[in-house]
Image: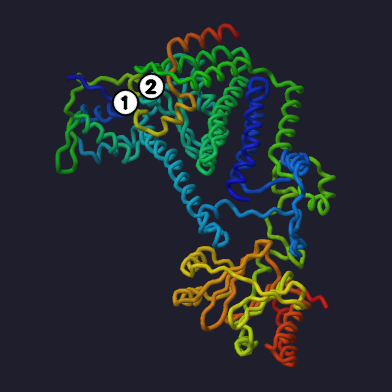
C-alpha cells in the first residue's frame, strides 16, 4: 500500500471522527476522542491494515460491483501463492529512503517522491526550528521560590524529576521536555491565589504524567509525513485541542465539579493577560477558548450509560471506518478465527490473527523470508556450474529460466521465448529497452535479488551492456543484461516464487523449489539440447543431494 | 537612561552589581550553581546584555562590566514581550491555528458572561 493509499484510507476515518466530534464533544468523556485520534495516528503511521466485513470499503466495493460490469481479470497460477490472510506492506521508512519499486515506475515516480521529500523536510523544519528557538528562551527561566509551589510539589511527586521554574517571556503556563519535564510559570501569575496555582500545577502535571508532549510530537510527525493531506492538518489541530480538553476534564474530576467556574475563570484570566498591543483576533481562537470553557462547564460524572455509549460508538466507528475491505479469499481461509473472534477487527493490535507482516510462505508453510532467498550455486566448488554454463554457451540458448508459471529461454540472438504449458508451445516475446545507466543506478539502490556480484554487473553495464525489460501480468518483471559474454537475468517478483535459473553468469535456485520442478528444469535443459541426458541425470542427482542436505526447507515431492 | 531587562538578564546584572567586573566564565559557574543554567544558556544571556548595551566586555578573559546601574534597570512587563517573542517564528501560524492568539476585550467579557450563565 502506498503512502497515498494510507493517507486516503485514514482520511475516511478522520472525517468520521471530525463529524462525531462536532456532534458529541461536550457529551462524551474526552477519553473517547483521544482513543479515536490514537487509532487515526496508528492508521497514518503504521502501514498495517485490518480487514472487516463491516468496513465502509466493503460496502463501497459491493456498490461499485452492482453498477459496473465485472472486469475480466487475468488470473495466472500465481494466485495460488497469494495467501489471503496476509497483507504485505513495506515499512514506511522504505518510502523515505529507497523505494523498492520497478525501474520504470521508479523513474516515473521519482519527481513525486522528490516533491514529497521537500514537503516533508520543510514541514519538519517548520516544527523543529521554532521549537529550538523557544527552547533556548525557555532555558533562561529562573527557579521559583514560592513556598506553596514547593510544598505542592513535595506532595505530588512523579517518577520523573519535574522542575518548576519561572519565566517572564510567557503569559500562560506551559510544560516542555519529555524525559526531563519542566513546568514554566509566567512571571506575572498571581502567586497569592493558591487555588488557581493548584489547578494550574495539576493541569501541567497531568500533561506530564500522560506524556502529552510526546503525543504532540507524534501528531506533528504525522503532519510531516502526510503534509499533502489537509484532513491530517485538521486532525492535528483538533487532537491538540482534545489533549487540553481531556486534561481539563481530569483536573475537574480531581477537584470536584464545583471547581468548574473557578477553573474556567482562571483560563479566561490567563487569556486576558495575553491582551497586548495588537487588537487582532482570530476566529479560530475564539472558537477554541470558547469550546474549552463550554467543555469545562459541561463536564459531568461519567455514568454507565455514557460509558457504554462511548464504547459502542468507538467500536462502531473503528469497525466501519478504520478497517479495509473484506477480502473474500480470507473469508475462506480464515473463517474460523473470524467467527470465533468477531471483536478482533475492532482493535488493530498486532496479536490478532488477521494481521501478519510476514512474507507469504510459498511451498513450505513454515518458510520465512530468509528461507526463500535464492541460493546462488555458481561458486559452490563441488558442483561444476562453470561447466554447465559452458554447455549453455555452446547451445542455441543464452539463458534458461523456470518458475511455477512459465518456462523461459533466451536465444543466441537475444530473442526471448516463453512457454506457459510446460514447454509444449513456445512463443516469442518482445521486450522494451531500458537505459543501462538508469538501471545501474536503480540496481545500486534497490538490489532486488542478491546472488550476483554487484561489482561485476556494474562494470558490465558501464562497458556498454544492453538492458531489456519484460513485465508479466502479475507484475513479475525481468531485466536482461546483454553483452558479448551472454545474458544475465535479474528478477523482480512481487511475491517470492520458486524458480530455477541458469544464465551466462550463474545458476540460481530458490530454496522452496520442489524436486519435481528441478527435474523438469533438467528435462528442459535436455530437450533444449543444452545437456546430454546422462550428464543431466548425474548433475540432477548431485544437486538434489546437496539441496536436501544444506537447505532444510527444500521439499522433495516425487 | 532607563533600560528594561528580563529576569534572566537581571540575574547576570545582579552578579556584576554585587561583585563588580567578573569574567564570563566565572559568571557561568555562579549561575550554574545558583539558577541551574547551562554554560551555553548563560553565554546566550550575556550576549543579549552586550547587544542591549547593558554590559561591556573587556579582554582578556571576557571580563563583563556593568554599564547600566541598578537604578537605571527596570523589569520588563510581560504583555509587551509576547509580541516580540512570537515575531518571525513560523510556529506562529500553528499557534494561531491552535487558538493561542490574543482575544479581544469584548471576547473576554463575553466568555466571562458565558461562565456566569452556565454556572
From the viewer's perspective, tell me whether residue A344 is left or right of residue B118: right
Q: Chain of mark 1?
A: B
Q: Position of residue B25 (x, y in %)?
A: 25, 41
Label 2: which secondary element: loop
Q: Position of residue A248 (x, y in %)?
A: 57, 22
Q: Which residue is mark 1?
A: B7
Tell me whether marks 2 and 1 sit on the same chain: no
Judging by the rendered image, the residue that carries numbered circle 2 is A187
In the displayed structure, A230 sits above or below A241; it is: below
Residue A50 visible in rendering: yes
Residue furthest left in the image: B59
- Where the C terminus of chain A falls, by quadrant? bottom right
Disc 2 crowd, CA 10 A, few/some/many (<14, 14-19, 20+): many
Q: Nearer the viewer, residue A145 or A344?
A: A344
Q: Which residue lies at the image location 69% right of the left edge and 64% below the top edge?
A: A368
Kindly indicate the quadrant of the structure image that contains residue A34.
top right
State the residue in front, B91 or A139. Answer: B91
Q: Give the colouring mode of the picture.
A: rainbow
Toward which corner of the image does residue A135 lie, by quadrant? top left
Image coords of residue A93 (percent x, y): 55, 53
- Find residue A513 and report its horizontal and vertical position in percent: 73, 73
Q: Which mark is residue A489?
A: none
The answer to which of A537 and B13 lies nearer the viewer is A537
User: Marks 1 and 2: in contact by CB < 8 Å?
Assistant: yes
Cα separation between marks 2 and 1: 9 Å
Disc 1, SS: helix
Task: From the viewer's perspective, tell me whether residue A266 is left or right of residue A387.
Answer: left
Amino acid at each position: 500500500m502506498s503512502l497515498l493509499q494510507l493517507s486516503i484510507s485514514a482520511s475516511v476515518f478522520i472525517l468520521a471522527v471530525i463529524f462525531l466530534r462536532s456532534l458529541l464533544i461536550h457529551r462524551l468523556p474526552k477519553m473517547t476522542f483521544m482513543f479515536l485520534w490514537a487509532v487515526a495516528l496508528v492508521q497514518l503511521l503504521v502501514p498495517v491494515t485490518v480487514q472487516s466485513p463491516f468496513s465502509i470499503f466493503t460496502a463501497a466495493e459491493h456498490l461499485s460491483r452492482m453498477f459496473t460490469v465485472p472486469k475480466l481479470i487475468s488470473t495466472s497460477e500465481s494466485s495460488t501463492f497469494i495467501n489471503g490472510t496476509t497483507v504485505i506492506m513495506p515499512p514506511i521508512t522504505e518510502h523515505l529512503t529507497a523505494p523498492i519499486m520497478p525501474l520504470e515506475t521508479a523513474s516515473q515516480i521519482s519527481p513525486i517522491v522528490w516533491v514529497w521529500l521537500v514537503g516533508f523536510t520543510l514541514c519538519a523544519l517548520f516544527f523543529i526550528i521554532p521549537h529550538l528557538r523557544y527552547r533556548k528562551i525557555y532555558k533562561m527561566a529562573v527557579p521559583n521560590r514560592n513556598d506553596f509551589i514547593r510544598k505542592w510539589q513535595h506532595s505530588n511527586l512523579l517518577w520523573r524529576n519535574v522542575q518548576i521554574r519561572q519565566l517572564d517571556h510567557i503569559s500562560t503556563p506551559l510544560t516542555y521536555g519529555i524525559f526531563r519535564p519542566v513546568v514554566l510559570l509566567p512571571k506575572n501569575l498571581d502567586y497569592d491565589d493558591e487555588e488557581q496555582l493548584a489547578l494550574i500545577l495539576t493541569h501541567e502535571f497531568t500533561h506530564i504524567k500522560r506524556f502529552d508532549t510526546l503525543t504532540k510530537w507524534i501528531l506533528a510527525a504525522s503532519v510531516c509525513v502526510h503534509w499533502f493531506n489537509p484532513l491530517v492538518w485538521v486532525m492535528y489541530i483538533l487532537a491538540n485541542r482534545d489533549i487540553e480538553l481531556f486534561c481539563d476534564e481530569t483536573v475537574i474530576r480531581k477537584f470536584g465539579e464545583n471547581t468548574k467556574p473557578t477553573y474556567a475563570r482562571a483560563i479566561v484570566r490567563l487569556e486576558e493577560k495575553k491582551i497586548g498591543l495588537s487588537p487582532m483576533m482570530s476566529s479560530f481562537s475564539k472558537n477554541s477558548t470558547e469550546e474549552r470553557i463550554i467543555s469545562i462547564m459541561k463536564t459531568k460524572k461519567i455514568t454507565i450509560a455514557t460509558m457504554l455509549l462511548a464504547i459502542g460508538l468507538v467500536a462502531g466507528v473503528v469497525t466501519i471506518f478504520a478497517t479495509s475491505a473484506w477480502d473474500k479469499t480470507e473469508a475462506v481461509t480464515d473463517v474460523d478465527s473470524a467467527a470465533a473472534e468477531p471483536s478482533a477487527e475492532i482493535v488493530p493490535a498486532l496479536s490478532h490473527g488477521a494481521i501478519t507482516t510476514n512474507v507469504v510462505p510459498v511451498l513450505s508453510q513454515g518458510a520465512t523470508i530468509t528461507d526463500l532467498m535464492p541460493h546462488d550455486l555458481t561458486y559452490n566448488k563441488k558442483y561444476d556450474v562453470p561447466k554447465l554454463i559452458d554447455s549453455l554457451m555452446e547451445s542455441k540458448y543464452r539463458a534458461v529460466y523456470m518458475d511455477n508459471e512459465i518456462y523461459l529461454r533466451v536465444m543466441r540472438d537475444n530473442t526471448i521465448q516463453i512457454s506457459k504449458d510446460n514447454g509444449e508451445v513456445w512463443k516469442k516475446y518482445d521486450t522494451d529497452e531500458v537505459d543501462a545507466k538508469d538501471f545501474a543506478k536503480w540496481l545500486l539502490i534497490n538490489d532486488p535479488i542478491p546472488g550476483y556480484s554487484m561489482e561485476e554487473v556494474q562494470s558490465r553495464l558501464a562497458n556498454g551492456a544492453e538492458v531489456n525489460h519484460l513485465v508479466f501480468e502479475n507484475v513479475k518483471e525481468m531485466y536482461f543484461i546483454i553483452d558479448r559474454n551472454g545474458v544475465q537475468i535479474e528478477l523482480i517478483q512481487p511475491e517470492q516464487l520458486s524458480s530455477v535459473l541458469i544464465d551466462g553468469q550463474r545458476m540460481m535456485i530458490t530454496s522452496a523449489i520442489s524436486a519435481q520442478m528441478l527435474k523438469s528444469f533438467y528435462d528442459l535443459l535436455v530437450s533444449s539440447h543444452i545437456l546430454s541426458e546422462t550428464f543431466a541425470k548425474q548433475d540432477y542427482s548431485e544437486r538434489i543431494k546437496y539441496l536436501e542436505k544444506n537447505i532444510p526447507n527444500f521439499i522433495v515431492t516425487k | 537612561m532607563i533600560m528594561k531587562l528580563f529576569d534572566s538578564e537581571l540575574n547576570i546584572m545582579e552578579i556584576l552589581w554585587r561583585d563588580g567586573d567578573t569574567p564570563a566564565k566565572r559568571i557561568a559557574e555562579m549561575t550554574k550553581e545558583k539558577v541551574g543554567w547551562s554554560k551555553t544558556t548563560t553565554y546566550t544571556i550575556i550576549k543579549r546584555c552586550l547587544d542591549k548595551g547593558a554590559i561591556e566586555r573587556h579582554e582578556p578573559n571576557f571580563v563583563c562590566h556593568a554599564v547600566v546601574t541598578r537604578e537605571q534597570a527596570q523589569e520588563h512587563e510581560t504583555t509587551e514581550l509576547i509580541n516580540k517573542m512570537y515575531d518571525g517564528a513560523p510556529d506562529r501560524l500553528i499557534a494561531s491555528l491552535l487558538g493561542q492568539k490574543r482575544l479581544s476585550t469584548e471576547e473576554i467579557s463575553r466568555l466571562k458572561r458565558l461562565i456566569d450563565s452556565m454556572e
